[in-house]
Image: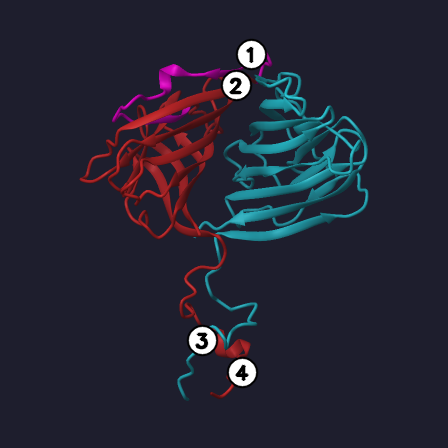
């Protein structure tokens, strides 16, 4: 076989090379942008391609002051109602330096519930207030095991607290998770972006 | 022109492919510290190109004992002095199996403070293997509408000696863009370590 010599010109306009489907270990899949949205649903790109998915949230801003940002999962059909058992704790500190703490928050965990799971609480609706963070979803297409997820957010709360929220748990189903939905407990998602990545 | 078919062997040594989509994690800068420096700053490439920036600090080793690894942010001008409100908590456990605990640390948080924020603490130079490693996310630093959220998780080797698992988060309480990030120890130089800054693709 002859030796093929490559140069920049030969590859300049290539958009895909053979079996090289991604460069790097974190692969961008999609961006969802809120604009006075009642919810944001991500229903494509969540399959067996990756063992781990990461959702990254930038400046999720509520229309309603003090609303809780929430997630739910679709395990077949069209409803976001996967059964979940979760843990919930937070660290908080107010701008006046009067109140700090680290607490388990039993009012916001779930025990075999199909309800939405809060992942960041009491987000303020002032112009500069928002919440940002990330959520990891592990092997959603697995049909043997439950589906674990872990999230961490920082919230600029309506009462001028910085609160760091930690939620983890599992969808207690062996059906594949093929969709994820985010919304506020009341009112619209006024603005913000959610980027979905796959981890090679 | 003949159709050229490439295979893995033929492109083995190609290191760059024009207009080919890159991965989602884009390395923007590496500060490789091999001799003492007072601080390690990132003052370029923090802009609207990416919405999410990730810093990885690896094996940060101080010159002094009982010192704290810290961060601050630049919101205009040349000083790293953005106003911040933060939370800090940690779990810890000594090598002699004592002092296992989990708690909020209100001696290290900030309430609209402009000082440096501790990421991890009580590490030192007593032994050459003492260091700390972890990550820090910075969200939408170029936004001029919202505050700038950040979150850090790290593991560190405490002076006593003991293991720390450290959690810090908060926001720069400013609508000015953040265009620089500075890391240093509370006393003495950074003796060695590597800090990498990545941008996460948004398309």
Chain letter of the residue beneath label 4 in the structure image: A
Chain letter of the residue beneath label 1 in the structure image: A
Residue A183 seen in the figure: yes
Q: Which residue is mark 4?
A: A5
Q: Which of pointers 1 and 3 indicates the residue nearer the eye?
A: 3
Is residue B32 or residue B92 the one in the foreground? Answer: B92
Is residue A31 or residue B169 the one in the foreground? Answer: B169
Q: What are the residue bounds of the magenta stretch?
A: A95-120
Q: Is residue A135 above or below residue B5?
A: above
Name which of mark 1 and mark 4 comes first in the sequence: 4
Residue B117 seen in the figure: no
Q: Residue at x 70, y 48 (%)?
A: B31
Q: Which residue is mark 3?
A: B7
Residue A141 percent coordinates (x, y):
30, 45
Q: Which of pointers 3 and 2 indicates the residue nearer the eye?
A: 3
Residue A4 percent coordinates (x, y):
50, 84
Q: Determine contact: label 2, label 1, CB under 8 Å.
A: yes
Q: Residue at x 26, y 34 (%)?
A: A173
Q: CA distance from mark 4 to mark 3?
A: 12 Å
Q: CA distance from mark 3 to mark 2?
A: 55 Å
Chain letter of the residue beneath label 3 in the structure image: B
* Tag 2 secondary structure: strand
Chain letter of the residue beneath label 2 in the structure image: A
* Tag 4 secondary structure: loop
For chain B, what colour was chosen?
cyan
Q: Which residue is mark 1?
A: A99
Q: CA distance from mark 1 to mark 4?
A: 67 Å
> Which of the 4 quarters of the picture holds residue A84?
top left
* Tag 3 secondary structure: loop
Q: Are marks 2 and 1 on the same chain?
A: yes
């Amino acid at each position: 076989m002859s030796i093929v010599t490559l140069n920049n010109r030969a590859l300049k306009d290539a958009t895909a090379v053979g079996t090289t489907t991604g460069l790097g270990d974190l692969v961008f899949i999609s961006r969802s942008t809120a604009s006075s949205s009642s919810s944001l649903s991500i229903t494509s790109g969540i399959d067996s391609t990756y063992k781990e998915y990461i959702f990254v949230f930038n400046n999720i801003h509520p229309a309603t002051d003090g609303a809780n940002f929430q997630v739910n999962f679709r395990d077949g059909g069209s409803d976001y109602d996967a059964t979940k058992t979760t843990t919930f704790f937070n660290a908080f500190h107010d701008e006046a330096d009067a109140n700090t703490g680290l607490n388990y928050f039993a009012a916001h965990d779930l025990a075999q519930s199909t309800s939405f799971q809060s992942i960041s609480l009491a987000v303020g609706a002032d112009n500069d207030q928002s919440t940002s963070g990330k959520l990891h979803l592990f092997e959603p297409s697995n049909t043997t095991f439950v589906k674990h997820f872990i999230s961490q957010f920082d919230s600029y709360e309506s009462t001028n607290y910085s609160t760091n929220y930690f939620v983890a748990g599992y969808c207690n189903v062996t059906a594949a998770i093929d969709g994820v939905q985010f919304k506020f407990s009341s009112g619209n998602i006024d603005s913000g972006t959610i980027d979905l990545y796959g981890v090679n | 022109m003949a159709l050229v078919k490439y295979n893995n062997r033929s492109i083995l040594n190609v290191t760059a492919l024009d207009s080919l989509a890159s991965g989602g994690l884009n390395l923007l800068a590496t500060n490789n510290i091999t001799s003492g420096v007072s601080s390690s700053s990132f003052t370029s490439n923090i802009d609207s190109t990416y919405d999410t920036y990730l810093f990885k600090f690896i094996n940060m080793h101080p010159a002094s004992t009982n010192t704290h690894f810290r961060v601050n942010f630049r919101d205009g001008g040349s000083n790293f002095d953005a106003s911040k409100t933060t939370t800090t908590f940690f779990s810890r456990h000594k090598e002699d199996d004592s002092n296992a605990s989990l708690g909020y640390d209100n001696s290290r948080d900030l309430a609209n403070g402009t000082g440096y924020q501790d990421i991890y603490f009580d590490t030192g130079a007593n032994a050459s293997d003492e260091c700390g490693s972890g990550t820090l996310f910075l969200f939408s630093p170029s936004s001029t509408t919202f505050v700038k959220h950040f979150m850090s998780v790290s593991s560190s080797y405490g002076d006593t000696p003991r293991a720390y698992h450290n959690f810090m988060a908060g926001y720069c309480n400013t609508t000015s863009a953040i265009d620089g990030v500075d890391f240093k120890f509370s006393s003495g130089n950074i003796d060695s370590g590597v800090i990498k800054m990545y941008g996460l693709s948004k398309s």
